[in-house]
């Protein structure tokens, strides 16, 4: 079996979808229909509106910590940072992780995304 989708609940579809409409094409996804994006290989992101009075995302609370994407080149990491910044989103500096370079971003609700280039021979997760 493989993971076929991730559903992200956002506090406001109107507020969050512009972020994802910029980010997802940069990491290889295309829009299938409103609030559903695919990688074309059987994996989907679905976005739904969170219910009122629910708790927001907490960085070190139980649950998902972040979603990670692997870039094919260091230049791709830099290009994603530049494109998201040009679109008006706050983007932190790229970090050097002992040879890998990583960009850590947050959506409007604080959900974290990582885009990392791993040099050949470097493990993605140790």
Image (cartoon, rainbow, N blue to C red):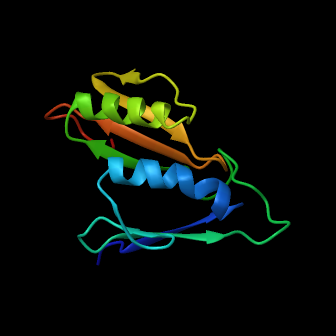
Residue 36 lies, with reference to residue 107, above or below; the image says below
* Rendered view: 116 above or below 17: above
Front residue of 66/61: it is 66
**Residue at x 65% of width, y 44% of height:** 59
Q: Quadrant of residue 114?
A: top left
Residue farthest to the right, as pictured: 53
Please give the name of the residue rendered at 49% of the width and 54% of the height, measured from the top-left corner.
20
| Quadrant of the rendered image containing residue 50 | bottom right
Instruction: Note whether residue 9 is visible.
Output: yes
The quarter of the rendered structure image containing the C terminus is top left
| Residue 91 percent across, percent down from the top left | 52, 30
Placement of the N terminus among the 4 image quadrants: bottom left
Q: Position of residue 63 (x, y in %)?
A: 61, 59
Q: Residue at x 59, y 50 (%)?
A: 111
Q: Is residue 109 left or right of residue 66?
A: right
Q: How many marks?
A: 0
Left or right: 37 in relation to 8: left
Q: Residue at x 29, y 64 (%)?
A: 39
């Amino acid at each position: 079996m493989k993971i076929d989708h991730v559903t992200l609940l956002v506090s406001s579809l109107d507020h969050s979808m512009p972020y994802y409409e910029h980010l997802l094409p940069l990491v290889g996804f295309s829009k299938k229909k409103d609030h559903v994006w695919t990688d074309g290989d059987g994996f989907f992101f679905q976005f739904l509106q969170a219910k009122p009075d629910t708790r927001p995302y907490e960085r070190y609370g139980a649950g998902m910590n972040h979603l990670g994407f692997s870039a094919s080149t260091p230049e791709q990491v830099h290009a994603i940072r530049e494109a998201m910044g040009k679109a008006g989103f706050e983007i932190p500096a790229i970090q050097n992780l002992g040879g890998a370079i990583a960009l850590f971003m947050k959506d409007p609700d604080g959900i974290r995304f990582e885009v990392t280039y791993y040099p050949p021979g470097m493990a993605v997760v140790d």
